[in-house]
Amino acid sequence: MSENTATVGEARAPRVVLVGLASCFGCQINITNIERHLLAVLGQIELGYWQLTSSEPMPEAFDVAVIEGAVTTEEAAETVRALRERAACVIAIGSCAATGGIPAMAAGDLASHVEAVYGDGLPKACGVLRAPAPVSAVIDVDFTVSCCPIDPFEFVRVLDAALYGSNRLDVTATLCGQCAQGEGGCLYKRGQMCLGLVTRAGCGAKCPGLGRACNGCAGLSPDANVTAARAFAASRGFAPGRFDEALEMFNAVALAPAGEE
Amino acid sequence: MLYRVIDRADLPSLVAAFMERYEVVAPVRRGSFYAFEAIGDFSEIALDYPTTIASPKKYFLPATETLFEFDARENAVTDYVDEVRPRVLFGVHACDINGIMNLNSVFNDPRYPDPYYRAHQDATLIVGVSCTPGDTCFCHLMDSEEARPGYDLFLNAIGEAFLVSIGSVTAANILEGACDVREATDADRAAFRAATRARQEAFNGAIPDVQEIPMLMDAFHEDGFWDELGGRCLSCNACASVCPTCYCFDIRDTLDPGAETGRRERVWDACTSPQFAMVAGGHNFRSTAAERVRHRMYHKLNGFLATHDRSLCVGCGRCAAACKVGISPIEVLKFFERKGADDGE
């Protein structure tokens, strides 16, 4: 991990920029929600750019680029490539940046979505549209903070990992194991369809713990066994089509047959 | 072993007596499931529970436990100071007591004694209770149907009374002080034998009694059966989360938001986790789910036996209930039975 660690040993504080692409900005807002710890976090870095909180322009040089949102235009693709060139470390935050998220639901058939919204006249301000994609589809990403929205403490943990290194491996186990630790009982036994079967663990299974089915916002695990999960859901009365449709909300790109980029 | 008899009506005062000096943890109902939880009153206890979602292991090996705290400014480490509560686990089934015995033999291994585990163990009294096996129970096939040592009291239900096996002086004193105890009579002993026979007859006959399991695990190590199980494994670790005897852990550092102080934590890990066997350089020596599932079963039904002289699996059946895709030692036993039937043809 050391090659991705931004600035250890340097005299100045690591310079961090925070960029929002196609998203609801909820993950950025959620970072501001840890008021009690915000000064402690900001005290470790030099915040070079954060449109949500300041109109200071993007600096020339920085160490860490934090990116929220999906890449939905050629301009955005250019932006993330430029960030990658300058930053020692890139952190993607939130479902949109990590999996394509909600915007990527349009990835399969962009033209018809554009037409439905804008008719013939796509405003110039939209830029040059492209199929919505996660940041990792355009550039290499060093760290990812999953979920919609992110857990701000998880963001701070990952930022610290980027700044100082970490002895933690990314997990690819799926969610049921963490959920079982909470001992709330499987939601399928209560007649609910839950996507924890194939979703990456790490969030602590907060939603199922509150009786609400997992919607897959942490992203499809690379080790997910979607075939077996579909079969299980079907055995509980949820047709594979329903399962796949639910999964598309946050994982349209991962589920699509091998894409272009 | 010392035996005494108490009436069922004595239980509330027994629990109240424990509560004076201990946190009491017992099975409670949660919707249509049961879980071990700290209780505030006897009425919360569901003593006739079939099983709980997860085992009482969490009171000996918490899912996350701080080992020490550090302060980077001072370059200082604060010794283990986690609060260990004096606790009574009330209403533990024999399989789980045997599971705890297995954990004890791992964490008290004189070569690497574990002070964190030991602190919990020393602060915990165990009160067992007899049970009626459910559909996924197979403790009798794993030599865990009875708890021999490993408890402070064991309540054997005999009608409206309990034949209490006494395992420690501490618990005996509390029992004597709280209940109207009497000597066991021949009738009590007869009732106990009848209850034991009734339990033995209640096991699910569809779970086959297979001899020489460790030998069969070796013999069928390369069988395609493991690919079948691996092919449907969801890689979720639910089996390990609910298991009374999975004891693997990872150790990691967690910084506080200011990154100047933090904690070294021990967290549950599991051999079914895809990263479990990843080593320096990124090589993963069990990179497929089939290898991971086989490894798990191997350790449960064979590997542990070689070092500790008993099966690690205690047949509690929780993994069979927790696994969405029907992977459990029960399936392995059925596979061996099918193989035996094939050979006989």
Image: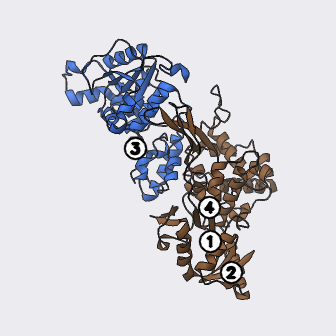
Chain colours: A blue, B brown
Q: Nearer the viewer, residue B11 or B232?
A: B11
One can see residue A104 in this view: yes
Rendering coords of residue B189 (x, y %): 72, 83
Please tell me whether residue B264 is drawn above or below residue B15 in the rendered image. above
Query: Are discs 3 and 4 both within one chain?
Result: no
For the residue labelled by badge 2, is the local secondary structure a helix, a strand or a loop?
Answer: strand
Please tell me whether residue A122 is drawn above or below residue B155 in the rendered image. above
Looking at the rendered image, the disc whose residue lies closer to the viewer, 2 or 1, is 2
Rendering coords of residue A105 (x, y %): 35, 33
Q: Which residue is mark 1?
A: B131
For the residue labelled by badge 4, is the local secondary structure a helix, a strand or a loop?
Answer: strand
Quadrant placement of the N terminus of chain B: bottom right
Looking at the rendered image, the disc whose residue lies closer to the viewer, 3 or 2, is 2
Q: Which residue is mark 3?
A: A215
Please tell me whether residue B24 is drawn above or below residue B11 in the rendered image. above
Q: Which residue is mark 2?
A: B4
Q: Which residue is mark 4?
A: B124
Query: Are discs 1 and 3 both within one chain?
Result: no
**Residue B269 lies in quadrant:** top right
Mark 2 and mark 1: Cα distance apart in space: 19 Å
Q: Which mark is residue B119?
A: none
Mark 1 and mark 3: Cα distance apart in space: 38 Å
Left or right: A215, with B122 as reference point: left
Query: Which chain letter goes with mark 4?
Result: B
Looking at the rendered image, the disc whose residue lies closer to the viewer, 1 or 3, is 1
Which three-letter amino acid code belongs to the residue tagged 2? Arg
Mark 2 vs mark 1: which is more N-terminal? Answer: 2
Mark 3 and mark 4: Cα distance apart in space: 40 Å
Sort mark 4 into few (<14), some (14-19) or many (20+) by Cα contacts within 10 Å. Answer: many
Query: Which chain letter goes with mark 2?
Result: B
Which three-letter amino acid code belongs to the residue tagged 3? Asn
Mark 3 and mark 2: Cα distance apart in space: 54 Å
